Image (cartoon, rainbow, N blue to C red):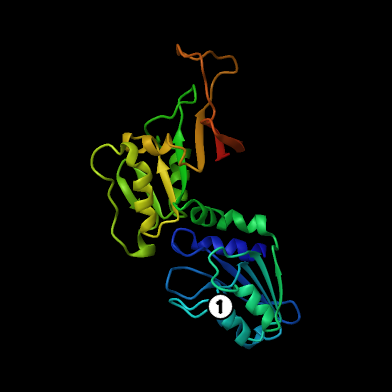
């Protein structure tokens, strides 16, 4: 399953609105004979790619997949049908699919005589599938905000060249859309083939939620906010950001802030620290919305 989780991440930023899924197939002797992941909407799903690689060696084997196999006809046939036709004996599922139609892929596999186990390493699989699943629950894309902070912890307008910019460039590959100084653009421009989106003209004001929903209507399941610009403030102040990544500069071991407010911050209120890392010139903080 950990191998399936690892390869599923290669679909981040290109599968939306579909989920990034990974699959590994073991033969009847427990040897890996095929693996696959979903790359792009409309193309074969992870299970089909893994079955293609395994061929007849999948018969009587075990399928390890990060998300419950689909059970409906869409742009591709249902994966549960492909697994049944391949005569696999067992399917291990990490996360159940909240979009399943009818009885669900797992139930139909059991009905066909396939042994099914669900919830296998679910928490680990949600490291990849979590934002997709959260976007379905909230009815909008999962939003991550990365910014540099001043010495007192207040967000700064720009990301200066260095570690924060390096992480931004890495993160854009795994997000559908990136919003920053240049407006709205695709994280992986070659992944969906659609045009670059533009921010609405003028202040967003109370329309921030509407803008995020509009971007979600494009099929986006994840958005990355970069730095601090006026157009972003309604989103960041409206409780719509799910995760923050803040870079705080180093300060002296004995230091008093040069401010009249008398307040210093680490991450905004309403977030729980999930990671703290020391870097050469900054401390990196990650917070998740409580």
Which residue is identified by label 1? 79
Picture mark count: 1
Residue 186 appears in the rendering: no
Residue 134 image offset from top left, x and y in percent: 53, 53
Q: Is residue 174 visible?
A: yes
Residue toward you, 213 or 220: 213
Q: On the rendered image, what quadrant is the N terminus found in?
A: bottom right
- Extreme-left residue of the structure: 201
Percent x, y of residue 53: 57, 80
Q: Label 1 crowding class (10 Å Cα cut-off): few <14, some 14-19, many 20+?
A: many
- Outermost residue on the right side: it is 29
Indicate the secondary structure of the residue bearing disc 1: helix
Q: Quadrant of residue 29?
A: bottom right
Relative placement, left or right, of 73 versus 112 is left
Left or right of 190? Residue 170 is right
* Residue in the image at 30% along x and 44% along y: 182
* Residue 213 in the image: above or below residue 207: below
Q: Position of residue 253 (x, y in %)?
A: 60, 18
Residue 133 vs 159, above or below: the answer is below
Q: Quadrant of residue 156?
A: top left
Give residue 47's position: percent from left, percent from top.
57, 75
Q: Is residue 252 above or below residue 112?
A: above
Seen at 53% across and 30% down, the residue is 269
Residue plotted at (63% across, 88% down): 56
């Amino acid at each position: 399953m950990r191998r399936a989780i690892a390869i599923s991440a290669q679909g981040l930023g290109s599968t939306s609105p579909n989920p990034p899924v990974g699959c590994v197939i073991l033969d009847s002797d427990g040897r890996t004979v095929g693996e696959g992941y979903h790359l792009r909407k409309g193309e074969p799903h992870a299970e089909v790619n893994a079955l293609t690689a395994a061929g007849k060696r999948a018969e009587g084997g075990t399928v390890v997949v990060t998300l419950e196999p689909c059970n409906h006809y869409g742009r591709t046939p249902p994966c549960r049908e492909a697994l049944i036709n391949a005569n696999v004996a067992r399917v291990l599922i990490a996360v159940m699919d909240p979009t399943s139609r009818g009885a669900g892929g797992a139930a139909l596999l059991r009905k066909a005589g396939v042994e099914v186990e669900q919830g296998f390493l679910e928490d680990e699989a949600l490291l990849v599938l979590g934002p997709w699943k959260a976007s379905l629950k909230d009815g909008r894309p999962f939003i991550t905000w990365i910014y540099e902070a001043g010495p007192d912890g207040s967000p700064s307008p720009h990301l200066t060249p260095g570690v924060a910019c390096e992480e931004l460039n890495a993160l854009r590959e795994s997000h559908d859309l990136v919003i920053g100084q240049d407006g709205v653009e695709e994280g992986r421009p070659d992944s969906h083939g659609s045009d670059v989106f533009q921010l609405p003209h003028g202040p967003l004001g109370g329309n921030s939620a509407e803008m995020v929903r509009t971007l979600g209507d494009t099929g986006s399941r994840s958005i990355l906010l970069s730095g601090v610009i006026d157009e972003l403030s309604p989103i960041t102040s409206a409780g719509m950001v799910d995760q923050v990544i803040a870079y705080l500069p180093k300060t002296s071991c004995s230091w008093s802030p040069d401010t009249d407010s008398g307040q210093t911050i680490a991450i905004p209120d309403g977030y729980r620290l999930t990671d703290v890392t020391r870097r050469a010139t900054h401390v990196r903080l990650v917070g998740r919305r409580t």
